[in-house]
Structure formats: C-alpha cells, structure tokens
Image (cartoon, helix red, strand yellow):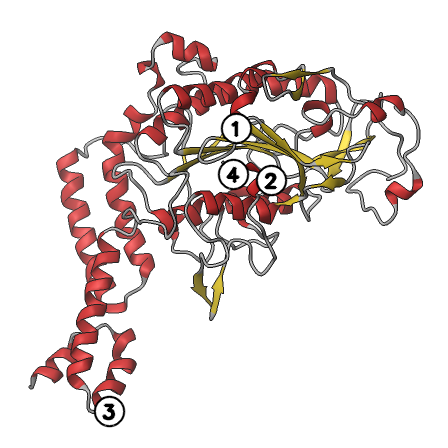
Amino acid sequence: MNCQDHFYRNVPPQALARRWFLKECGVGLGALALGQLASTSMASVAADPLAVKNPPMRPRAKNVIYLFMAGAPSHLELFDYKPQLAKYDGTLPPADLLKGYRAAFINPNSKLLGPRFTFAKHGQCGAELSELLPHLAKVCDDVAFVKSMTTDAFNHAPGQILMSTGSQQFGKPSLGSWTLYGLGSESHNLPGFVVFSTGTKGPSGGNSNWGSGFLPTVYQGVQFRTSGDPVMYLSNPRGVDRGLQRESLDAINSLNQHHLNEVGDPEIATRINSFEMAFRMQASAPEAIDISQEPQHVLDMYGAVPGKPSFANTCLLARRLVERGVRFVEIFHEAWDQHGALVADLKKNCAATDRASAALITDLKQRGLLDDTLVVWGGEFGRTPMVQGGGNDGRDHHPNAFTMWLAGGGIKPGVTIGESDDFGFNVTRDKVHVHDLHATILHLLGFDPTRFTFKFQGLDQRLMGVEPARVVQEIVA
C-alpha cells in the first residue's frame, strides 16, 4: 500500500469525492496538503466551537442583556404621552387614520382610549415618562428611547419570532445565537447564551426565540431556572460521584470523537461540547446563580430576595453571568398582554420590572460594565389607541408604532428619537423597523450587518434576511 492509498483509507467519507478528483487529476500532493488542512480545521472546531473570536470592526459592546417584555407593553401608558388622545378620549378615531388598517382582534372603529396614567419629564435629557416608571426616570440620562419602532407582525408568536430571529417563520437563528456564532464565549464553565423566563407563562413563540435555526446547535440558548438546579438534572443521581462521571464522559466522548472524525457532522462536535459543558457547569453554575452572596444593599437596589424567583432576581443574575463571561443573557417576561385589566396589570407589571431594570443599569455602570454591555428593553409590538374590553380598560395589538429603550454598549445616552402621530398610531419621524434594530445591535457588536452571514442552502444567510436595514446612527455614541 502506498502513502496515498493509506491516506484515502483514513479520510472522512464526506471528503472522498473531492480528494478523489484531486488525485485523479494528478495533484495527489495537493490533495494531501488539503486533507491535512481540513483535518486540522475540523479538530479545532471540535475542540472548542465557542472559542472567542474577534469581530471585523471595533466592537462597542461585548455582551448583551435583552429584557424582552413579551406580550407587548402599552407605549401609550408608559413612554409616549399623547395629549390629543386624552382630549378625544371616548370618540371615534378619524376615518383617514384607519384607512387600510388591519387589527388583530378589535373593530378598528372602536373608540379612542386616552392614557390612563400621568406623565412628567425627567433628568437632564427631559425624557417624558409615565408615573409607573419612577426608577427608570432616575437613570433616563443613561438611556436612549426609540419612540418610532415598527414591525410586520400583529400577533404574539410571529411578532416575538420576528423580534428574536428577524423572520416570522420558525427555524431561523435567534439574535443571541448569531451573537454567539460571531463572537464566541468568554465563559469556559457556563453557556455563552443563557435564557430566563419570569412572567406568568413562557413566551408565545416558545423555544424558537432562542433557537439556533440553521446554525450549529452549539449556539442555541440554554434555559436556566431561577431556583434549585440552574438546569434540570444538573446534579448527579445518587451513587454517581464526579470521578465515575468523568470516566463515563471520557468513554462517551471518545466514541463521539471517532464518529466525528469519520463523518464530520458538526452536530457531533456540539454533543461533545454539551457533555463537557454540563460537567463543568455542575461546579460553576450553582455558584453563579447564588445571589445570596451579594451584599444586602445590592439586593435592595434590585428588590431581589434570594430563594424567591422574580424578575428582580433574574436581572441580578444577568449581571453576575455577564461578569463571568456569558455573552448573551435574555429574560422573557411574558405578562404584558393587556386586552383587559389594563390599569391594574400595568401597575403590577411595572412594580415587578421597573426597579430591577433601572438597577441593572446602575449596577453595570458602577462596576464599569455598562460601556461593554448593551441592555435592550422592549416587547414585540405596541398597543392600539382604541379601546378593547369592557369598562374602557384594554388595548389590542398594534404593530405600527411602539417604544423600546437601549443603554450602554455604545448607545448614546440621554436621547429620544422618533415620533408618532397625535394618537400614537403611526410613526411620523425616524422610523425604526425591527430589522433596523437588529442591524444596529450587530453594528455595536463589531459586525457589518450586510456582510455578517452564514452559508446555508446555497445562500449567504443574514439575521435581517434579504430585507433592507439601516444602522440607527441617531442612537450610536
């Protein structure tokens, strides 16, 4: 057997066709070199698919904490005060306003509903905020408010999937997965993308909100619990000690590595990485989520109580995870779908989230982490200026105009951009589509959003798909 025969008997089957071509064309030495390079590359990916990567441009942000207010908060009660809406409360909306409009559940000709809470200006920036957000008001000079958000979806699951993945269709990678794919993770002992759910239920879009889609599954989000083991079955069963587990993993990984070398499937590399990560997490994750280690004044600032699951506890956990190198932390608080009980539920939701959201900004800033950490707050769409439900106490889904805010990570502090009409119905200035938000986040992370791609089904896939998108320079510092 000559050296080339030996080489071809030991290469992965998926490479044989290419290398056979090179051999038969009389360039066997080139095939040998190419095979060695491919083998080295494959081993590198298998060894650490989450290795830290440098983006092509200077990043403004290294980490992201996304506070996803699932269910869609009412911009009209929280951020976008409309005196004219208050003035015409209880009257029918102008006919020209509703031309061509599609509503989710209500008759578009329902009467207008004025804002249910009072507003005031705060900070040196003069941000106008609802009385329901007293803590955010104290840090508004660190925040950029975007009052001109728009989206294409007016129901929860497609709206959340669009906000999370850039598409209303299932099966696309989430923003967190794209971030992890592009930057890798600085944490060796924790997942690079961690997800929490703190609302009355999980998000309507389900696991697709943090899925990896066509990216390797090593980049998908890992859902953590807020009490007990951070991940189900993290503790060893009775009778299995760490030494026995290590021996078992070594045997399993050896078989998986052999299979990877044979077929080159990246999902096998994901499996190897997942087993090793789980082993390391058994020691690191319980310490990372133990907020009882925090000083009492920090717990009080967030309104966090150790052992009592809450949005406040989870915001504090997000800071602890970012400190430990986790790249992307997302908190879904599905509680904002106020078709009825608008006043009571908004009071309850803001009481649960306002203090902790503001504390997160303050805490990150005090620790020198805010410059490198991008904080995003918002839901999948807004709410109608028309009433829904009995007793003038509800609003329907509304994609035409809503508000989000961002802080840290290269965001210009203390600015408000965008404007909607007198009824908060349509954007009239500085429109920012969901795709524009995604492009801006990728830009802050150091990527050209139009060139940050992954080859799939013969196409260079992007987070924004083929849709046009712009970086919102008005909020970039």
Q: Earlier in the sequence, mark 4 or mark 1?
A: 1
Residue type, label 3: Cys
Q: CA distance from mark 4 to mark 3?
A: 54 Å
Residue type, label 2: Ser
Q: Are marks 2 and 3 in contact (CB under 8 Å)?
A: no
Residue type, label 1: Pro
Residue type, label 4: Val
Q: Residue at x 41, y 39 (%)?
A: 60
Q: Are marks 1 and 2 in contact (CB under 8 Å)?
A: no
The answer to whether residue 31 is left or right of residue 454 is left
**Picture coordinates of residue 140 (x, y %)?**
56, 21
**Picture coordinates of residue 256 (x, y %)?**
23, 57
Q: CA distance from mark 1 to mark 3?
A: 62 Å
- For numbered disc 1, what is the local secondary structure? loop
Q: CA distance from mark 2 to mark 4?
A: 31 Å
Which of the two marks, 1 or 3, is nearer to us in this view?
A: 1
**Picture coordinates of residue 366 (x, y %)?**
38, 19
Which of the two marks, 1 or 2, is nearer to us in this view?
A: 1
* Residue identifier under label 4: 476
The answer to whether residue 330 is left or right of residue 251 is right
Q: Which mark is residue 413?
A: 1
Residue 237 visible in this rendered orientation of the protein: no
The answer to whether residue 313 is left or right of residue 383 is left
